[in-house]
Structures are given as structure tokens and as C-alpha cells.
Amino acid sequence: MPTTYGKDYRDFDLDFGAHPAHGDIDTIKKTTAISRSIKNIIRTNRFERLFQPTIEGGLNALLFENFGALTSSRIQSAITHAINRFEPRADVKDITVKAEPDENGYYVSIIYVPDNDIKETNLEVYLERT
């Protein structure tokens, strides 16, 4: 059984599923909560959150740049900066960005360690132009 350090994180389930026992909104725990938070942060554009306009992933303009090593590197830097700034529960170990020009998107793999655990977690996200 893995050892858990620190807090036990809980967030609301944004799918708004009902808890089977008491009917309230269900919650998600630990690495699932952190992974969903990271996905939400990197997919958020500037001024998209009403009372928190500074929260952004910084990727909107980069997704419309030409495909290449420089753009992939800039996407990697923007994701690292956004996670370090807005998600203190995750310690990023590695980010891999793979361009898919035929699909007009990028496959992103984020490896991080939650601050309440010692096990690395791999999060895969597909970013596309919208």
C-alpha cells in the first residue's frame, strides 16, 4: 500500500455526478483532482475566468503558430510556467510536446509528482486549435 504524505485533496467533480449514498455532488480525490486542475489551467485563455482574469495557460496564440521545434519548445515553456504559477500541488518533472501537423494539434505528456505523494503521475493532453 503506498504511503500518502501531506493533505488529502478533494475537488468537486465537474461532471456534476451525484453521490450514490447521499445525492450531493460527487468529489474527486488526490491525483485525479490535480490532473483535472492542470488540464483546466492549460486550456484556459486570458480573461476567461470572470473573477480571476489573470489565470491562463498561455497557449491560445501558440497553437496558431507554424509547426516546428521552436513552437513546441515555447508550448513546453508556457505549460511549465502555468503549472508552476497556478498549481502548487504539482512538482513538474518532465513535459514532452509532440506536434501533429496533419491533425492541427499537439500531444502533450506531463510527468509530475503530487506534493502529497511520492509516485510520479503521467498526464496526457491533446491540444488543438479552436
Image: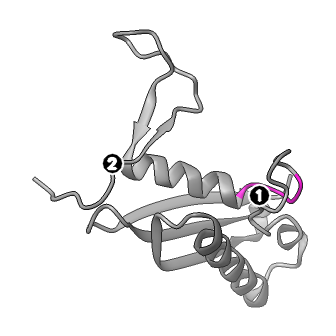
Q: What residue sits 45% from the left and 74% below the top?
A: 91
Position of residue 31 in the picture relative to residue 18 (left or right): left
Q: What residue sits 37% from the left and 11% below the top?
A: 20
**Secondary structure under the numbered disc 1 in the rendered image:** strand
Asked whether the beta carbons under mark 2 and mark 1 sit within 8 Å of each other, the answer is: no
Q: Residue furthest bottom?
A: 70
- What residue is disc 1 on? 128
- What residue is disc 2 on? 8
Q: Quadrant of residue 68?
A: bottom right
Q: What residue sits 52% from the left and 32% below the top?
A: 13
Q: Is residue 68 above or below residue 1?
A: below
Nearer to me, 55 or 2: 55
Q: What residue sits 81% from the left and 79% below the top?
A: 67
Colour scheme of the rendered structure: one colour
Q: Which SS type dominates the magenta stretch?
A: loop
Position of residue 66 in the picture relative to residue 57 (left or right): right
Residues in magenta? Answer: 43-47
Residue 102 pos. (x, y %): 77, 65
The amino acid on which the numbered mark 1 sits, given as a three-letter code, is Glu
Nearer to me, 38 or 64: 38
From mark 2 to mark 1, how far is it between C-alphas?
33 Å
Q: Is residue 92 above or below residue 127?
A: below
The amino acid on which the numbered mark 2 sits, given as a three-letter code, is Asp
Q: Quadrant of residue 116?
A: bottom left
